[in-house]
Image (tube, rainbow, N blue to C red):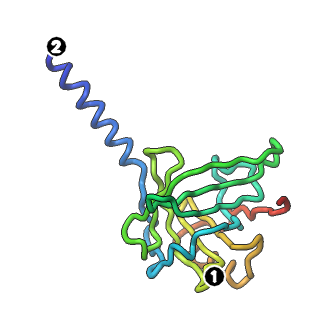
Amino acid sequence: MKSFKKIAIPISLGVLGFVILNSCSVGIPKGAVAVKNFNSDQYLGKWYEIARFDYKFEKNLDNVTASYSLNPDGTIKVQNRGYDYVKKQWKESIGEAKFVNDKSEARLKVSFFKPIWSGYNVIDIDENYQYALVVGNNTKYIWILSRTTEIPESFKQRFIAKAQKLGYNTDDLIWVKHDKA
């Protein structure tokens, strides 16, 4: 009985760990396609969050930005920053992103709490890398990004239409205010 416990407990913990780690999906919503011929170097830099759903980790945040830079090991540093208008303070979170497949496909996985990874999929971007539509693993996660604090109406409508076609309830989008430097 003692030797059974010596084997059963570590195996059970290993299986449990495997299940927990695999529950962290790095998928892409059904019907969504990540941008091909993606230029990751051109994507680096600062982006302003124009719209998103109401996520617990971004609750009460305005003036949200995401900055992407290359780490020495080839991964991407992700630095998210936003102003909590209730607590009247800036919040920042730093994570890491890696490509799921090839660098030329805009499918990444991102982690702010290793070893938990989530999908980050650029599914639409303009030819000059000024405006982007990003989705997570499923239709609960979506971001509209811009290199400036505003987005032209044509891109806003294009991204909303694409999101709706994939099953996103775009009426739930929060349009982020940018009024602080």
Q: Quadrant of residue 5?
A: top left
Q: Quadrant of the N terminus?
A: top left
Mark 1 lies on a secondary structure that is: helix
Amino acid carrying label 1: it is Arg
- In the rendered structure, the answer to whether residue 54 lies left or right of residue 165 reads right
Amino acid carrying label 2: it is Lys
Q: Name the residue under label 1.
A: 158
Which residue is located at x 77 percent, y 70 percent? 149
Q: Quadrant of residue 181?
A: bottom right
User: How busy is the neighbourhood of tag 1: few (under 14 within 10 Å), some, or many (20 plus)?
Assistant: few
Instruction: Work out which residue is located at the far top of the displayed protein and give it.
Output: 2
- Measured along the vertical axis of the image, is residue 73 above or below residue 23? below
- In the rendered structure, the answer to whether residue 9 lies left or right of residue 55 reads left
- Measured along the vertical axis of the image, is residue 91 above or below residue 40? above
List x then y, in percent, for residue 66. Answer: 65, 61
Mark 2 lies on a secondary structure that is: helix
List x then y, in percent, for residue 72. Answer: 48, 59
Residue 72 seen from this side: yes
For the residue pair 169 and 3, the one nearer the viewer reads as: 3
**Label 2 close to label 1 by CB (< 8 Å):** no
Task: Tell me the mark number nearer the camera, choosing from 2 and 1.
Answer: 2
Which residue is located at x 70 percent, y 85 percent? 154
User: How busy is the neighbourhood of tag 2: few (under 14 within 10 Å), some, or many (20 plus)?
Assistant: few
- Measured along the vertical axis of the image, is residue 171 above or below residue 111? below
Q: Mark 2 points at which residue?
A: 2
